[in-house]
Image: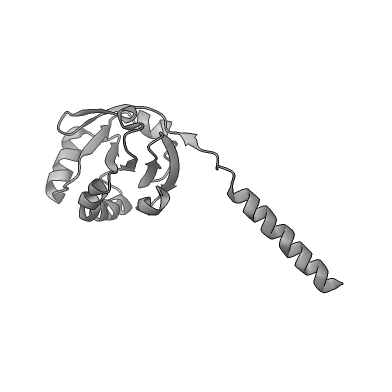
């Protein structure tokens, strides 16, 4: 009897897991914003909706963890781009002059965008940095992490 009860409980648990797998997770729409790159290129997040996914990383020059992640991004930015993902490295609240010097000194190969008044970071509830936000083609935030997420796996 006890064995039958354990088997029955296992079957019920498996059924709930199977049924639960069919339900879509709650997706949070990514807030739209417009920003400008160090090269004065204006970009609006919504221009990528239904076109391609976007990987945003929020960072600052003074953050040692950000520096480590920017080094990783510099190594992987070409691959990210060839995988069809738009990369947006958004600096939070620093002067353009400071960021330009930092980017030039580190020879980053990716575009850097400015959030001079931290308004974008506020929209995205950025508390700690670095912070990645992965946005799918539909414009929903599907992941966030403090290190480069496995975007290939998450976008499948």
Whole-percent x and y of residue 44? 29, 27
* Relative to 78, 127 lies left or right: right
What's the residue at 16%, 28% (across, down)?
Answer: 40
Whole-percent x and y of residue 148? 34, 52
Whole-percent x and y of residue 27? 51, 38
* Relative to 119, 35 lies left or right: left
Name the residue furthest right: 1
Whole-percent x and y of residue 17? 64, 55
What's the residue at 25%, 51% (across, down)?
Answer: 73
What's the residue at 17%, 48% (across, down)?
Answer: 108
Q: How is the image coloured?
A: one colour
Q: Which of 97 and 110 is in front in this view?
A: 110
Q: Nearer the viewer, residue 85 or 50?
A: 50
The quadrant of the rendering that contains the N terminus is bottom right
Toward which corner of the image does residue 85 lie, by quadrant? Answer: top left
* Relative to 21, 64 lies left or right: left
Q: In this view, does 141 lie above or below 156?
A: above
């Amino acid at each position: 009897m006890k064995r039958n009860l354990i088997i029955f409980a296992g079957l019920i648990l498996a059924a709930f897991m199977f049924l639960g797998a069919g339900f879509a997770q709650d997706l949070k729409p990514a807030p739209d914003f417009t920003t400008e790159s160090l090269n004065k290129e204006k970009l609006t997040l919504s221009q990528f909706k239904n076109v391609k996914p976007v990987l945003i990383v929020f960072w600052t020059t003074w953050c040692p963890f950000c520096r480590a992640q920017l080094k990783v991004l510099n190594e992987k930015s070409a691959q990210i781009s060839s995988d069809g993902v738009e990369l947006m490295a958004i600096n939070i609240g620093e002067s353009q002059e400071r960021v330009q010097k930092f980017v030039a000194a580190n020879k980053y190969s990716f575009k850097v965008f400015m959030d001079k008044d931290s308004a974008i970071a506020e929209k995205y509830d950025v508390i700690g940095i670095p912070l990645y936000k992965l946005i799918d083609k539909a414009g929903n935030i599907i992941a966030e992490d403090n290190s480069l997420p496995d975007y290939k796996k998450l976008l499948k």
